[in-house]
Image (cartoon, rainbow, N blue to C red):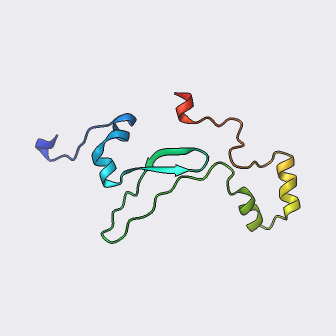
Amino acid sequence: MRKFEVPCAPVLSMKEIAYDPALRASGSVVEVQQERRGSYLTVGSPIKFSGFTPEITGAPLLGEHTDEVLTELGYSREQIAKLHSKNVVGSSGSSRGHRDIRQSA
């Protein structure tokens, strides 16, 4: 394909991506820390700037900002507490069906 100037590259496995030194050095794959989950790999910024390096942080946990969002939408503390008591909404890490990918492998 390169003979005909068709852009191409190998397809890497997740393990190969995780340990590829070039991807780590370029910031395409970065390690982040999340308070409850610990350290894990995620995608870095696909856009590179000469004078700016964006800070890549861990993703929020399921339900981590639920109360904050509901408050911004105008729900009172009492209404939010009622939603929690009826299991309409949950708080961080409360998903019964959640399994970390490392546990399911």
Corner quadrant of residue 27? bottom left
Q: Is 69 displayed left or right of 34 in the figure?
A: right
At x 72%, y 56%, the residue is 66
In front here: 6 or 69? 69
Residue 100 pos. (x, y %): 58, 36
- Residue 46 at x, y = what percent? 37, 57
Rendering coords of residue 41 (x, y %): 45, 45
Left or right, 9 with respect to 69, comes to: left
Q: Is residue 26 left or right of residue 88?
A: left
Residue positioned 40% across, 58% down in the render = 45
Depth check: give the residue in front, 81 or 8: 81
Looking at the picture, does residue 63 appear above or below residue 96?
below
Figure label count: 0
Residue located farthest toward the bottom when viewing the structure as drawn:
51
| Residue located 53% across and 53% down the image | 58
Depth check: give the residue in front, 7 or 59. Answer: 59
Instruction: Name which residue lies at 48% across and 51% down.
Output: 32
> Where residue 26 sits: x, y (%)?
31, 54
Q: Identify the image quadrant of the N terminus.
A: top left
Residue 50 horizontal side relative to residue 94, left or right: left
Looking at the image, the residue that sits furthest to the top is 105
